[in-house]
Amino acid sequence: MKANPIVGQGTPLHRWQTSSHLAHVPVIDILDLVPAGSRAVVVAPHPDDEVLGCGGLLQLLAADRPLQLISVTDGSASHPGSRRWPVERLSVVRPQESAEALRRLGLPLHHLKWLRGGFADSQVAARETQLVDFIERHLHPEDVVFTTWRKDGHCDHEAVGRATVAAAQRVGATVHELPVWTWHWATPEDRLVPWQRARKILLSPAQVARKRHAIHAFASQLEGDPQIGLPPVLAPYVIERLLQPFEVVFV
């Protein structure tokens, strides 16, 4: 994979919607994936990845399984060089946006445990060993852990994926990976994507609508900075690819 595959507008939504390859990905019930007696743990690189990657999954689990969210960074490097969105502002705003998004999903903060890792945004790989130790301290053997795919195309997503898999292996927890930026750079037939491990979790129209509403809580990510030619991180074509009537996990 090239150094930064997240460029341009990426693979058009209609290619995913018309893909027979994607249509044949097996469906799985999330309550089978997270059996009774297990806790679901989501390890998110930035405050928004838990909604982008598994906002539907979280809705489906909320009533029946205990939830733990770990936000590895504060997301403060999303607008490099911006005076409108400086690091100091983002470090405060992005966790607030995440809290509002979780509320919109129907997950008030009293309903789940939420840990913040305090690792530097865009620099996670430099402290990957420490991150493995941090995640390990908060996992139990019966946990079912969800994190970003180790080859998702964003340096933090990949480092968090690697660290989470390593930590889960140490404690004997089950771990599954989530594509987020994969929908941007990959294609339905891309051999780099582990389609044999892919499973679909089906979402109702109401659950997709609630996920859309939650994504729109991330105001900072919906805005770029025109003064320095910085486009929004979550442009409309990015959001639409993440709002299909299912979410995919690599089991």
Image (cartoon, rainbow, N blue to C red):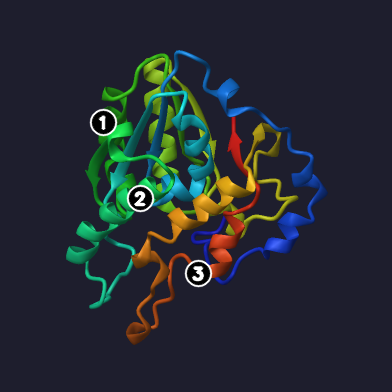
For marks 3 and 1, the one nearer the N-term is 1
Q: Residue at x 48, y 50 (%)?
A: 52
Q: Residue at x 38, y 40 (%)?
A: 107
Residue 99 in picture, x, y percent from top left: 31, 48
Q: Disc 2 designates what residue?
A: 46
- Disc 3 to disc 2, C-alpha distance: 17 Å
Residue 167 in picture, x, y percent from top left: 37, 26
Foreground residue among 115 and 171 = 115
Q: Residue at x 59, y 61 (%)?
A: 240
The answer to whether marks 1 and 2 mark residues whose Cβ atoms lie closer than 8 Å is: no
Foreground residue among 42 and 121 = 42
Residue furthest to the right in view is 20
Q: Disc 1 designates what residue?
A: 134
**Dot 3 lies on which element?**
loop
Local crowd at mark 2 within 10 Å, few (<14), some, or many (≥20)?
Answer: many
Q: Is residue 113 visible?
A: no
Callout 1 amino acid: Phe
Residue 235, numbered circle: 3
**Dot 1 lies on which element?**
helix
Q: Is residue 123 visible?
A: yes
